Image (cartoon, rainbow, N blue to C red):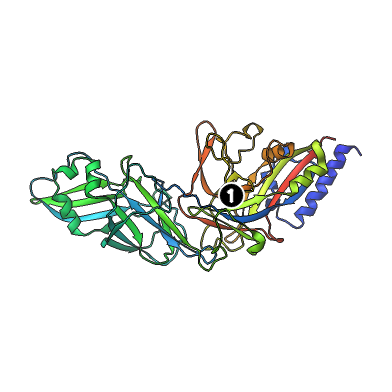
Amino acid sequence: MNSAVRRFTLFFFSLATLASCEDPSDIGLDLQDDNEIGAFYTELAVNSGTVLKPDSVLSFKQQPLPVGGYQDATLGNVKATAFTEVGLSGLDVKFGDNPVADSIVLSLDYTTDIYANNTVPLTLNIHRLTEGFQDKASYFTNSSLNYDSDVLGTVTFDPKVLRTKKTDQDSIAPVNIKLDIALANEILAQSGKEPLKDQFKFVQFFKGIAIVPTQQSPREIFALNTGSNRTKLTLYYKNGTEKKDYTFTMSGSNVRNFSNITANRSGTVLENLSNYEFLPSTATGGETYVQAGTQLFTKLTIPELANFKAENGDSVVINRAELVVPIKSGSIATLSAPQQLAIYETNNSNRILYTSKGEAKTVPADNPSFMDVYTFPTRLEFKKKSDTEGNYTVNLTAYVQAILRGDKPNDGLLITPAKYVGNTSGGGTIANESIPKRAILSNTAEKGVKLRIYYSKLK
């Protein structure tokens, strides 16, 4: 029996053994190309822990804006409040000779990405800002603006995804909030005057609004779509018997907004977690955590790669290396898992590493040519297996090969929810996930994080 046949026979029986105890999709075979299957297979354990980064997350003009909140016994309760300006639809606005206000209505359009969908309705209060946006300021998830304690309007509703039969697509119905008629009268009184000359003067007169969930612990977050023409402020009035209306926009380059996100971790395992501290999964029952907007990361290290290299030497060729990160069973029952997790290089400081040009060192897509190019980032993709189970997976073949060659350090990775934005050149960028989605990751003996390697030997 020649060596090629022996390797194939060994690999065949290895697969048979694995298949007897695992679902084929769990061992990565669903991602294999026929010409990538090597003669050997191994699993390397991955160490994990939770890291809290103190850096602020940019929230200024992020799309969409989260509003609401959710309760989570594991990570603590989360609350999101939106702050936004309102935009004139033109210049030198006039409402006629004797305008009389009928009403003023705030309409909020939102995406179908509703998080922590719950049967408990969400109540929002609309307040007038007393502190305006600053031209040279940046706004983050921990930023806030002062607002009047008086309520302009309130609404209680249940954000819902609707299925449109005509188009067979998901949609939503914008929520309409009737505001205090005094605001309508105040705006009409400025007809043809300086505050309605342009946007700069208007925001000095009317600084904007805060959209505030009233419950101490809301149970639902919706994603406010400020870019939609259905998100607007409409002033209804009459000139004589003629009914008219004027629409103020909530989008455009001259309208500023952001969301403030807070997390109350009192009574959770993360209550005393310090900035950049590594909290190992062995101290949290085999769990680690990621959450967008609050800077919760999971750090992964693969110390067994050093032993793998020592045992196999320079003759090993990685046919495929797949990182598999399972979620905790049942943890997605009410809070769905983020679809994607960004992957960043790190070291003992537990910080994201950056290039000399200020680029975050994301783990690149599986191509040897991209190892030092950070405009082709890869990411962990969530694969839901059932209503209670699922894994994050990513192909790290070229990256692992680079570590074994000594071209990349084996210092660890940081993962957190994010969005991948592709471009026409085939590359892309990793953008912030604006909605504070979370995932509870499992790293126990029964259900652990693994690096699954299919490899060949040249000698």
Q: Position of residue 408 (x, y in %)?
A: 68, 38
Q: Is residue 223 visible?
A: no
Residue type at tag 1: Ile
Of 165 and 156, the residue lying toward us:
156
Residue 16 drawn above or below residue 362:
below
Residue 437 drawn above or below residue 191:
below
Q: Give the residue at x 29% y 52%.
A: 131
**Farthest residue, direction right:** 1
Q: Position of residue 288 (x, y in %)?
A: 61, 58
For the N terminus, the quadrant is top right
**Farthest residue, direction bottom:** 267
Residue 320 drawn above or below residue 221:
above
Q: Give the residue at x 8% y 46%.
A: 97
Q: Which residue is mark 1?
A: 415
Q: Is residue 153 visible?
A: yes
Q: Position of residue 33 (x, y in %)?
A: 69, 40
Q: Seen in the image, is 313 located left or right of residue 385?
A: right
- Tell me which corner region of the image, top left, top right, bottom left or bottom right, holds residue 367: top right
Q: Seen in the image, is 108 located left or right of residue 275?
A: left
Badge 1: residue crowd in 10 Å (few <14, some 14–19, many ≥20): many
Q: Seen in the image, is 441 located left or right of residue 305?
A: left
For the C terminus, the quadrant is top right
Q: Tag count in the figure?
A: 1
Q: Position of residue 441 (x, y in %)?
A: 61, 57
Q: Give the residue at x 24% y 55%.
A: 105
Secondary element type, mark 1? strand
Residue 233 drawn above or below residue 396:
below
